[in-house]
Image (cartoon, grey):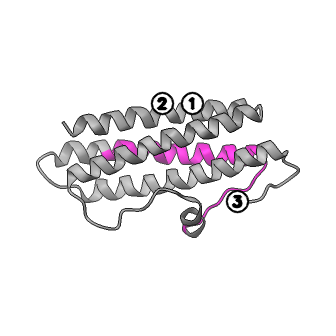
Amino acid sequence: MVQSTSKTNQHLQKVADELQHFLADTYILYLKTQNFHWNVKGSNFYSYHKMFEGQYTELAESIDEIAERVRAIGCYVPGSFAQFSQLASLKEERTQLSAKDMLKSLAEDHEVMADHAMQVMAKAQKAKDEATADLMIQRIQVHEKTAWMLRSSLG
C-alpha cells in the first residue's frame, strides 16, 4: 500500500489500495503481452503479433488512467518494478511459450483482471466513488472482450 497524500477517508483509502494492486497487475499484464508480441512465432505470427500490439497499447493507456485515478483520490502511485512485483497477483512469463499457450495465458489473465475490476468496483461503490466505479466498468468491458477474443483465437 502506498500511503495517501492527505486526509483520505478510510473507504477511499481501501479503494486506492485496490487500485494500486489493480495497477500493478495491469502493468504485469502489459509487460507479458508486449513480451508475447515480440516473441510469438508460428503460422499465425502476423495476426497474433498485431493482436498483441493492440492489446499492449490499450493496456499502456489504461495504466495512466488508473494511476491518475489513484492520485485523484489523494494517494501516491507505486512506480517501480519492485513495488509492482510486491503488489501484483499476476505473474510474469519467464519462459518461451508456444503461440497457443500465449493465448491461453493471456485469456486467463484477462479473466482474472475482469474479476478483480468487479471487486474494485464494489469497494468504490461502497465508498460512493462513482468515478472509480465507472473506470472499473470500462476495464471489465475491455478485459472480458479481450479474453473472449483470445479464447476465440484458440479455435
Helix, strand or loop for the magenta stretch, by majority: helix
Label disc, if present, on residue 1 of the rendered structure: 3
Q: Is residue 113 above or below residue 125?
A: below
Mark 1 → mark 3, Cα distance in angstroms: 23 Å
User: Residue 70 at x, y = what percent?
Assistant: 69, 47
Residue type, label 3: Met
Q: Is residue 127 above or below residue 35?
A: above
Residue carrying label 1: 137
Query: Along the horizontal axis of the image, is 35 left or right of 75?
Result: left
User: Residue 50 at x, y = what percent?
Assistant: 27, 44
Quadrant assignment for the C terminus: top left
Q: Quadrant of residue 66?
A: top right
Residue 127 in view in this figure: yes
Q: Secondary structure at mark 2?
A: helix
Q: Earlier in the sequence, mark 2 or mark 3?
A: 3
Residue extending furthest toward the bottom: 82
Label disc, if present, on residue 78 of the rendered structure: none
User: Residue 56 at x, y = what percent?
Assistant: 40, 48
Residue carrying label 2: 141
Label 2: few (<14), some (14–19) or many (≥20) C-alpha neighbours in 10 Å: few
Q: Earlier in the sequence, mark 1 or mark 3?
A: 3
Label 3: few (<14), some (14–19) or many (≥20) C-alpha neighbours in 10 Å: some
The segment highlighted magenta reads 52-81
Mark 2 → mark 3, Cα distance in angstroms: 26 Å
Instruction: Give yes or no for contact between labels 1 and 2 (Cβ–Cβ under 8 Å).
Output: yes
> Is residue 21 found inside the magenta-colored segment of the image?
no
Q: Secondary structure at mark 3?
A: loop
